[in-house]
Structures are given as C-alpha cells and as structure tokens.
C-alpha cells in the first residue's frame, strides 16, 4: 500500500540519516583523538636583528642562543618539546590507530616555513653579535681563572708594598732580590695558567731559528744609536708605554670583574653615532669594563710620563712591564717542544754572548729607560754616574715563561701520572732564577739570566718525560690547533 511504502521510505531515510550521523560522529571522535595525541606543530621563532624577518620552524630539543637587550650576556637555553608534559596514551582500537598515524603525517608536514634571505646589514649585525658572544664567554673563563688564582694575585699585589716598608739600607739588596724573585716566579706561574680571549700566534721553527739573529740586530742598532748620541729612548718609551696601556686594559678586565659588582661585567655604554661609525660598531655600544680598564691603562701611562723622578714612580713602570709580560705570555704559543728547544737554545747563546762578550747588553739595559724591565731602587750612593736601580729584564720572564706555559698544554694532552710538567717547569724556573741571583750576589757582576733559566726549564721537561715514561711523546709533542682543541673538548 501507499501508506506502507511511505513508512518504508521514511524508515530507510531515518536509517540512512542515523548511519551518516554515526559515521560523522565516529570520524569527529577519531579526528579529535588524533589531534589530541599527535605531536603538536609548535614553532621556535628566531630573529637575526631588530626589524629583521623571522624564521619559523618546529621546536624540538635543540640549543637556542638568544641575544638579550644587546648586552654581552648570551644565554644558552634548551627548548623542550611541547609534548614532553603530555602523557602518552596507547589506543588499542586499530581503526583509531590507523587514522591517528594517517593524520599525523599532515600534522607534522603542515608547517609553514617563512625563510626570507638575510640582508647584508642583518648579516653583519649577526656576525658582530656572535663575535661579542664568543668574547663574553671567554671573559667569563678568564674571570673564573683569576678567581681560582686569587692567592697568587694577592701575593703579587703585596709584593708591590715591599718597597714602601722602609727596610734599613743594609737590607735593601736582599729585599730587592726577594722582590724580583717573587714578582718573576708569580708572573710565570700566573701567565702559564691564564685564560685568553683570542687564540695565540704560533712560533714556527724558522721563527725560532731567526729569533737570536733578529734580537741581535735590534740590540746592536740601539747600541749604535746610543754611541752616536742619537738617543731613541723617548720614541721607544712612548711606543712601549702606549702598548702597555692596551695591555693593562686587557689584563685588567678579569681582575676588576672579581672585585667590583656583577653589573660591572654586563653594563654597556651607547656610543655617539659618529664615533660608532668611525669605530665600525654595530650595535653602537662598548662594554663598561673595557672602557674602565683602558682609562686605567692611560692613567698609568700618564703617570709614567709625569715630570717626577723615576725613583718615585718605578712601581707604575713595573705595573706596565708586568701587563706587557702577561699579555705576551697569552698571545704567543711555542707550538711544539722542538720549536721551544730551538728558541730557548738560540737565546741561551745570544744572552751569554751579549752579556759576557761585549758591553752591549748592559749599555742598552741601563741607558734605554722604558717599561720593558722590572726595576727596584738601589740604596743612595755618592757616585752620581751609578744607575739607581737593580734590573731584571722582561725577556728573562717572558722567554722561559712561554716554555712554562707550553708545559701546561703538555699536561693537558699527555696527562702525566707521576709529575706535572707545568709544576716541574715552574719549580725549575724558580731554581734557575735563584741560582742567577746567588751568582750575581757573589760576583757583583751582571749575569745572563737565560744561562741559568733555559737549561733548567728544558732539563725539567726531559726529566719529567723520563719519570712519566713519556720522553718520546714529550720530544715529539705539538700543541693542538685551536679547531682541534674545540673538537676534543
């Protein structure tokens, strides 16, 4: 009947609608579960510079470096995956598992990556910020090392008070020996352990062979000029003192950071646009600590050139010389043990010849007044021609000091089990210097310090090599390049 047919059609339509609704609900349910449990397509957005284009990409477990407020503090953060805080759930329904794995492909791939090309200005900004970040990390290491060596630095500072203690004149010679000995040994020790912000220049074997010849030409030229009454002292001292100001600026940063509040290490000063352009600064800022230590270096240079007798300002001269020594120890690497042996061996004969064979070394050391030596006032005498200071040449600290620092690198690589090469070399330097002072006190004649220092240092390394069963490794040792060291670390 018609009524029966209408009822059948109505039932069929009702069943179709119910089935469609069920399928739709089931699909929505599956989609909802898939969306809930699939990994979220979150993004990490990076900006290379202010106003630059952004790059969006999925965030996972990765290292992200952010540069904050143009300060020199870079914070290394680990961006955690957004699904780490969610509880993984397993669905035993094979249908929902199928839809979940199917839709997951689209949730992972449906990522819009906007990656416009970097402009030249943005690239320069990024490179500069990366350079500053590297320097900031290096300065933190230097600061930490100074903190570790706080006691030797305090001892070095206390030594500068020794000349002010007012010892009787009869004891001044022994006081000067104690001053030189403590200053030199402490400088060699601290210079051998210091951290640097830039990789050092490596000395090649050809450079080591040429060093005695170049040094002989330089000292010979100075001697000839002095004999011709053409005193180059002023020009030489101006150049050295200006380099000394820069050296104080460099060495002073980690020292002041350990004394002043933490903000001293992070604050920056905005530079006027014209000066920033002249200095090629982008961003146009300079660190407060660098400016403060540069001013300190210039003040020391100004005091050095003040119209005051050197006996009243010799400590300032020694501070400049010390900064030059520390900077030199950090800026030069001997590279290999054989290069070190060649350099120290050549300068061993150079020092002996110019001190014992001629009057060249003594003449230049006493006539050229510049902060390239440590000085200590002698007791006053009636002889106006006598030089008023005892002298320890800067080369007698720097040359063996480079070898002692090199031995610290040998320690890092060879890992000796019995005797530390660095400790042995430092002790050998102290013994050699003490022997030099003893001979000088007995003979009352100037001594070539490298005559005693170089054999002591080289001999200590070879003896330690034998004691540690590493003689062959020591003789063939070459310091790793900077890139190799970074990979090893």
Image (tube, rainbow, N blue to C red):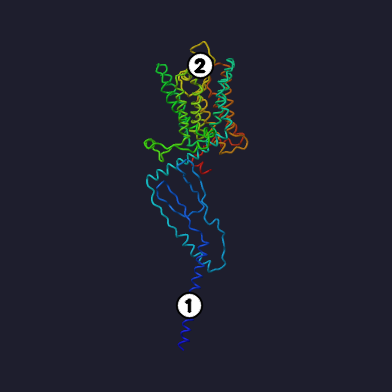
Element class at badge 1: helix
Give residue 109's position: percent from left, percent from top.
Answer: 45, 60
Q: Quadrant of residue 113?
A: bottom left
Residue beneath label 1, please?
Answer: 16
Viewer-proximal residue, 269 or 257?
A: 269
Viewer-proximal residue, 319 or 312?
A: 312
In the image, is residue 186 above or below residue 35? above
Which of pointers 1 and 2 lies earlier in the amino acid sequence?
1
Viewer-proximal residue, 251 or 405?
A: 251
Give residue 360's position: percent from left, percent from top.
Answer: 46, 19
Residue 486 got which mark?
A: none
- Decide if residue 430 is on the left or right side of residue 48: right
Residue beneath label 2, please?
Answer: 388
- Residue 468 can be seen, yes or no: yes
Mark 1 → mark 2, Cα distance in angstroms = 116 Å
Q: Quadrant of residue 70?
A: top left
Element class at badge 2: loop
């Amino acid at each position: 009947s018609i009524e029966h047919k209408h009822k059948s059609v109505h039932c069929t339509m009702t069943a179709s609608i119910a089935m469609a609704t069920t399928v739709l609900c089931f699909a929505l349910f599956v989609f909802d579960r898939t969306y809930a449990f699939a990994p979220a397509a979150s993004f990490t957005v990076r900006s290379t510079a202010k106003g630059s284009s952004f790059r969006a990409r999925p965030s996972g477990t990765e290292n992200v470096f952010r540069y904050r407020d143009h300060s020199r503090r870079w914070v290394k953060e680990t961006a955690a995956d957004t699904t780490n805080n969610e509880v993984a759930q397993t669905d035993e329904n094979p249908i929902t598992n199928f839809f979940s794995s199917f839709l997951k492909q689209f949730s992972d791939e449906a990522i819009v990556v906007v990656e416009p090309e970097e402009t030249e200005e943005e690239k320069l900004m990024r490179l500069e910020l990366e350079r500053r970040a590297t320097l900031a990390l290096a300065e933190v290491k230097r600061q930490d090392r100074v903190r570790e060596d706080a006691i030797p630095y305090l001892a070095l500072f206390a030594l500068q008070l020794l000349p002010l203690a007012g010892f009787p004149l009869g004891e001044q010679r022994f006081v000067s020996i104690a001053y030189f000995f403590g200053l030199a040994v402490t400088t060699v020790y601290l210079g051998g352990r210091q951290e640097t912000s830039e990789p050092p220049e490596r000395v090649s074997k050809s450079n080591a062979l040429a060093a005695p010849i170049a040094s002989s030409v330089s000292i010979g030229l100075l001697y000839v000029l002095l004999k011709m009454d053409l005193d180059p002292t002023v020009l030489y001292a101006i150049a050295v003192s200006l380099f000394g100001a820069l050296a104080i600026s460099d060495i002073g940063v980690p020292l002041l950071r350990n004394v002043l509040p933490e903000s001293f290490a992070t604050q920056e000063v905005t530079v006027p646009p014209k000066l920033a352009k002249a200095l090629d600064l982008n961003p146009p800022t300079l660190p407060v600590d660098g400016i403060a230590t540069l001013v300190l270096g210039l003040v020391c240079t100004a005091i050095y050139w003040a119209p005051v007798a050197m006996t009243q300002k010799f400590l300032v001269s020694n501070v400049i010389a010390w900064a030059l020594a520390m900077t030199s120890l950090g800026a030069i690497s001997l590279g290999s043990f054989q290069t070190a042996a060649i350099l120290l061996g050549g300068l061993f004969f150079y020092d002996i010849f110019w001190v014992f064979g001629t009057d060249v070394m003594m003449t230049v050391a006493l006539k050229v007044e510049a902060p390239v030596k440590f000085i200590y006032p002698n007791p006053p005498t009636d002889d106006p021609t006598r030089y008023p200071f005892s002298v320890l040449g800067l080369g007698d600290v720097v040359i063996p000091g480079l070898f002692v620092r090199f031995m610290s690198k040998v320690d890092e690589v060879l890992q000796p089990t019995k005797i530390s090469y660095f400790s042995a070399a430092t002790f050998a330097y102290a013994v050699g210097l003490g022997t030099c002072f003893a001979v000088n006190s007995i003979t009352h004649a100037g001594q070539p310090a490298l005559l005693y220092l170089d054999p002591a240092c080289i001999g200590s390394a070879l003896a330690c090599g034998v004691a540690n069963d590493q003689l062959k490794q020591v003789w063939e040792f070459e310091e790793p390049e900077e890139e190799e060291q970074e990979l090893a670390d």
